[in-house]
Amino acid sequence: MKMVFLGPPGAGKGTVAAKAKDYYSIPHISTGDLFRSNIKNKTELGKQVEAILAAGSLVPDSVTIAMVKDRISQPDCEKGFILDGFPRTIAQAEALAEMTELDAVVNFVISNEEVVERLSGRRMCPSTGHIYHVKFNPPKVEGKDDETGEDLIQRDDDKPQAILHRLEVYTAQTEPLIKWYTDRGLIRNVQTSNSMSPDAVFEETKKVLK
Ligand code: ADP
Ligand code: ADP
């Protein structure tokens, strides 16, 4: 199964992908995670994109497309993959269509108010990548990763200034992809809200993918 998870920042793409990758036995490829690990390891790519991520702007298409092309040509992607956070522009979607044929695009639908509430409470573990929320999905011990006990962090781009900018970027650059993929018969909508548990959202996702 080759699929894309689409939706605004904070829609729950990463949270559902963490469950779906085990269920479907396919890799979860988050372009945001790939950039963050390059930044952490101080690679050339990491140095190139660090300020862009901190501001909540988009990394140039050419850089992002090359990174994804390399990743999905690895042997573990032969049977499928979940692309989380890619494509984010029409140019990226066109490039992806040339690389491979998708089975589905899951579009996570959520209100702007709920997105802001989710992003401002998001915490993550920089080494395991586990995602938490201070209210909706708290760790067992406050501020610590459930698995390793490491300190959780708040991403720079989850601070108020960057959140608003990211939502504008989403509306201008990424939202047009809903129509683009609808026209190609690939969109599967999943309605979500903060009163729905991540498990309930995952159940809906499985339903629309059947
Ligand atoms: P979120 O899950 O909150 O939507 P991500 O982790 O997917 O955020 O992305 C974090 C940042 O990484 C983005 O704000 C952007 O700077 C960069 N990024 C991730 N994916 C892409 C992409 N497909 N194109 C351009 N920039 C990207
Ligand atoms: P995305 O990858 O789309 O940016 P995340 O999966 O990182 O979104 O989720 C954003 C925030 O919302 C995280 O803090 C996460 O714990 C929380 N979250 C995810 N799913 C739900 C849900 N169903 N209800 C409430 N909060 C959620």
Image: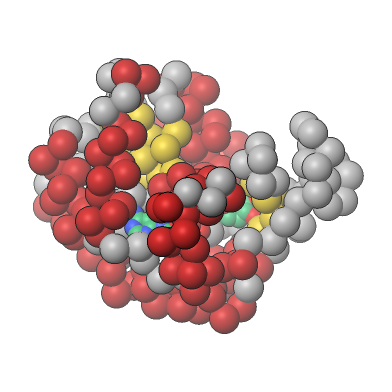
Q: Looking at the picture, how far across and down is residue 148, in whole percent?
A: 79, 34
Residue sitting at x 55%, y 31%: 19
Q: Looking at the picture, how far across and down is residue 97, in whole percent?
A: 14, 42
Image quadrant where one finds the N terminus: top left
Q: Looking at the picture, how far across and down is residue 95, in whole percent?
A: 15, 48
In the image, is residue 191 above or below residue 48?
above
Frontmost residue, 200 versus 52: 52
In the image, is residue 54 above or below residue 10?
below
Tell me if 147 is positioned left or right of 65 in this view: right
Q: Quadrant of residue 99?
A: top left
In the image, is residue 166 above or below residue 93?
below
Image quadrant where one finds the C terminus: top left
Residue sitting at x 45%, y 19%: 25
Q: Quadrant of residue 156?
A: bottom right
Does the rendering let one see residue 46?
yes
Frontmost residue, 11 versus 89: 89
